[in-house]
């Protein structure tokens, strides 16, 4: 839960600063946890760094 809270805090700080936060190439287990707690709806994730930057 500490990691989830850190991601949410980072997302909120990014939004407040007018920038975005995206996850690049998270492992399947990480993606699954993000889906289970609903963070995937808040912070987008992409299969690669290139795709995250291009989005």
Image (cartoon, rainbow, N blue to C red):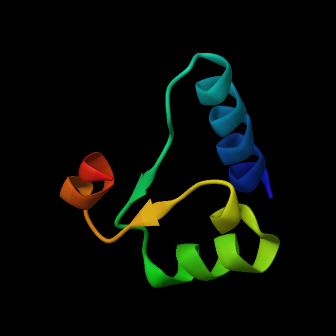
Q: Is residue 25 above or below residue 54?
A: below
Q: Residue at image x 64%, y 34%? A: 10
Please name the residue shown 50% across and 26% down the image.
19
Say left or right for 13 vs 37: left
Q: Is residue 13 left or right of residue 27?
A: right
In the image, is residue 5 above or below residue 34? above
**Side of 9 where 14 appears, left or right:** left
Residue 17 position by quadrant: top right
Residue 24 quadrant: bottom left
- Could you tell me which residue is drawn at 71 percent across and 32 percent down? 12
Quarter of the figure that contains the N terminus: bottom right
Q: Position of residue 25 (x, y in %)?
A: 34, 66
**As drawn, which residue projects farthest toward the left?**
50
Percent x, y of residue 9:
73, 35
Q: Nearer the viewer, residue 5 or 21?
A: 21
The residue closer to the viewer here, 54 or 46, is: 54
Residue at the image point whose x is 19% and y is 55% from the top: 50
Q: 31 or 54, which lies in front? A: 54
For this orientation, the residue located farthest to the front is 55
Q: Is residue 44 left or right of residue 27?
A: right
Residue 6, relative to residue 35: is it above or below? Answer: above
Coordinates of residue 6 in the picture (x, y in percent):
70, 42
How many numbered discs sit on the rendered protein?
Answer: 0
């Amino acid at each position: 839960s500490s990691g989830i809270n850190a991601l949410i805090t980072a997302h909120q700080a990014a939004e407040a600063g007018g920038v975005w936060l995206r996850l690049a190439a998270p492992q399947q287990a990480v993606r699954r946890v993000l889906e289970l707690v609903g963070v995937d709806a808040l912070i987008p994730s992409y299969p690669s760094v290139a795709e995250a930057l291009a989005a």
